[in-house]
Image (tube, rainbow, N blue to C red):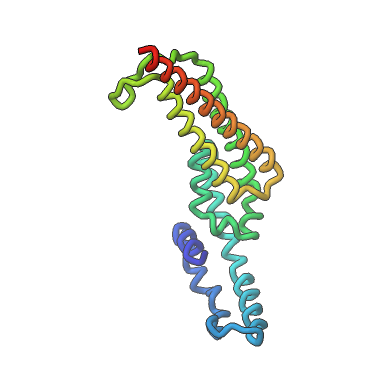
Amino acid sequence: THEELTDLLRESGNVEDTKRVDPFEPFESIRPLQYNRYTDGAWQDALKEFERRLQPLEHRIASNLRAKISKLSDRPKQHLREFLQYRTLVERPSISKLLRGEREILLNRLSDYLTSLERQFEHQIDDDVSDTKTSSSRGKNQPQIVDRLVWAKQLEVKIHGLQTHAKKILHDLSGFEEFQGNVEHLYNKTKNWRRSQFVKWRDQTEDQVRDG
């Protein structure tokens, strides 16, 4: 966390702030390996002082993050990736609270992105491709249904990753539960379609082999 704080302050030209106020100074007289119930009071006092010293730095960091993140608000995947890059900082209560508005914007953008993924899925399954047609994907002749099964699996992975990553930094927002439900719905719909199509393709292939 301290390294991420320093890096962001350095980017904004405020690295001197960490030199004027060293958050770790309260721990200089503490020996962590000798921690016991008798030293707990001193340890807790050092933690409180550490948090107090971080507060002004965290306000500057939140401002710097806001400036970096706002540039990507129209690109949801990159927007999420930027948040995840500084996940340790964003998970800190004070920074998380200061960036609540930006996190809500991200949740809305990801919801729109999820809707676009669902439209892609519906378009793909509505496109009635004959199981006997072949595709030259990666230079190999194979039924187009195989390409579609691969595409569906890739979509499942994408949806699952979206849910996993978003949960790390957006789980406390009021709209996240609905978003999570929509993600799970699309994930299950994609998985069930892929499985049913695979069974259909397998059965047809076996019939063709038997018929010679």
Q: Which residue sits at x=43%, y=21%? A: 145
The C terminus sits in image quarter: top left
- In this view, 188 is above or below 29: above
Q: Which residue sits at x=62%, y=47%? A: 170
Q: In which quarter of the image is residue 134?
A: top left
Residue furthest toward the right? 174
Residue furthest toward the front? 210
Is 138 left, or right, of 59 in this rendering?
A: left
Residue 171 on image: x %, y %: 64, 48
Residue 113 on image: x %, y %: 56, 33
- In this view, 145 is above or below 104: above
Which of 91/75 is in front? 91
Residue 99 on image: x %, y %: 62, 51
Tally of numbered discs:
0
Which of 113/117 is in front? 117
Q: Which residue sits at x=54%, y=58%? A: 88
Residue 169 on image: x %, y %: 59, 50
- In this view, 53 is above or below 96: below
